[in-house]
Image: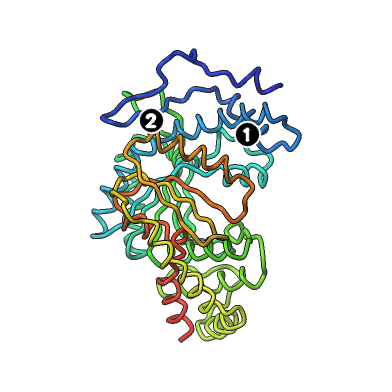
């Protein structure tokens, strides 16, 4: 069915599509699930006309924005509960990037965009794996949570073969007062600092080497190194090792040391970090707003950063930026909400090309 036959908003164009809460305007879900799914198919269809693709993007952007209200609700709860288990947690929220949506729809042809569980995502990084367990336990207590748990993935008890570790909880939002957003899904990720350092290093190396290491695609040598390094961190945390890696520390350390030397991992990561001196200069004048838009240009070795107080303005500029850099493999943009610029750097060190903590973990693991 042509997109223009199913993608019309449920409300008339003159209807109020925002909920105001203080100075923030929240987008209501304005399209049917069928329209959203059709837009997703059109977006990844290479035969789509430019006009159909523009209409599809309008639907997708509206659908993404509509997750901001339930996501913000979850972020407030997550920030409070994380502070109960850790004196200095890092909590951030983000709406899924267009390239990530495209990649996921292309990897899983049967997936429907309306059922994607991580359009809205909030993450808590706490000091230790024990604190991860404490925080997750709170949310798994059904007597405390009115929202419906739709998926629980514990990648600490059972790490992915890539080495990824962390806990993901996907919830279907429910409110008896704000029912317009009921049914929208939000994903909560909880990681220890060691796990977070590993995950962001994967993204940094993947970006510089132009490999989708995060999706287990790319150089076998790099994929093996990160799997081994994840097991080394799992040993430190006394948790399950990554499948296919040595189960004794001596053999693991020997192979890890060899892989790190062959790839010159430490030297490469430190060289990436030299860009940080240049990047930091672009942050002069940041006012400390909670909404930050980041544009990382690896070719120019430059990070441009904007801060916003108005969510609608932030979303508008984010969508325009994504359109402008689409298809540029060495450009990456993300809109996130954190409590401070310092928290931003802790939550997204890959955008600041900062792998300092991960390098320290490697040095300890191969010592």
Q: How is the image coloured?
A: rainbow
Vertical side of 93 occupied by 237: above or below: below
Task: Tell me the distance, in whole angstroms, between the alpha carbons under discs 1 and 2.
Answer: 25 Å
Q: Which residue is depicted at the point 42% across and 25% down?
A: 28
Marks 1 and 2: CB-CB under 8 Å?
A: no
Q: Which residue is depicted at the point 44% across and 36% down?
A: 315
Vertical side of 116 occupied by 277: above or below: below
**Residue 138: x percent and y percent?**
31, 49
**Residue 269: x percent and y percent?**
50, 73
- Whether residue 242 sits left or right of residue 27 in the image: it is right
Residues 52 and 177: in front is 52
Residues 237 and 117: in front is 117
User: Quadrant of residue 183 in the image?
Assistant: top left
Q: Earlier in the sequence, mark 1 or mark 2?
A: 1
Which residue bears the numbered disc 1? 40
Q: Quadrant of the N terminus?
A: top right
Packing grade of label 1 (10 A; few <14, some 14-19, many >=20) is: many
Residues 262 and 108: in front is 262
Q: Quadrant of the C terminus?
A: bottom left
Which residue bears the numbered disc 2? 174
For residue 188, the mark is: none
Q: Which residue is depicted at the point 72% across and 32% down?
A: 48
């Amino acid at each position: 069915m042509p997109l223009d036959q199913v993608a019309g908003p449920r409300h008339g164009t003159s209807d109020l599509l925002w909920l105001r809460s203080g100075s923030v305007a929240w987008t209501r879900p304005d399209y049917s699930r069928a329209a959203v799914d059709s837009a997703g198919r059109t977006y990844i269809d290479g035969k789509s006309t430019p006009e159909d693709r523009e209409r599809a993007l309008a639907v997708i952007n509206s659908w993404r924005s509509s997750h901001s209200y339930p996501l913000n609700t979850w972020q407030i709860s997550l920030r409070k509960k994380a502070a109960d288990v850790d004196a200095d947690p890092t909590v951030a929220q983000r709406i899924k990037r267009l390239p990530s949506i495209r990649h996921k729809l292309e990897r899983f042809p049967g997936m429907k965009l309306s059922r994607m569980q991580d359009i809205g995502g909030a993450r808590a990084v706490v000091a230790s794996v024990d604190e991860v367990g404490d925080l997750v336990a709170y949310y798994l207590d059904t007597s405390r949570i009115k929202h419906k748990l739709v998926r629980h993935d514990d990648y600490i008890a059972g790490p992915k073969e890539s080495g990824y570790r962390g806990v993901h909880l996907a919830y279907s939002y429910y409110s008896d007062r704000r029912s317009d957003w009921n049914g929208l899904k939000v994903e909560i990720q909880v990681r220890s600092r060691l796990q977070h350092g590993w995950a962001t290093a994967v993204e940094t190396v993947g970006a510089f080497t132009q490999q989708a290491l995060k999706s287990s695609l790319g150089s076998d040598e790099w994929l093996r190194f990160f799997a081994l390094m994840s097991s080394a961190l799992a040993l430190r945390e006394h948790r399950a090792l990554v499948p296919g890696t040595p189960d004794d520390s001596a053999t693991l350390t020997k192979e890890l040391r060899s892989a790190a030397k062959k790839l010159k991992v430490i030297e490469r990561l430190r060289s990436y970090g030299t860009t940080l001196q240049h990047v930091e200069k672009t942050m002069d004048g940041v006012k400390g707003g909670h909404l930050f838009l980041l544009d990382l240009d690896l070719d120019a070795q430059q990070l441009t950063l904007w801060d916003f107080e108005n969510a609608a303005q932030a979303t508008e500029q984010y969508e325009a930026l994504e359109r402008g850099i689409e298809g540029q493999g060495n450009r990456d943009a993300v809109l996130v909400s954190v409590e401070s610029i310092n928290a931003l750097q802790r939550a997204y060190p890959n955008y600041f090309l900062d792998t300092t903590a991960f390098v320290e973990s490697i040095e300890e693991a191969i010592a």
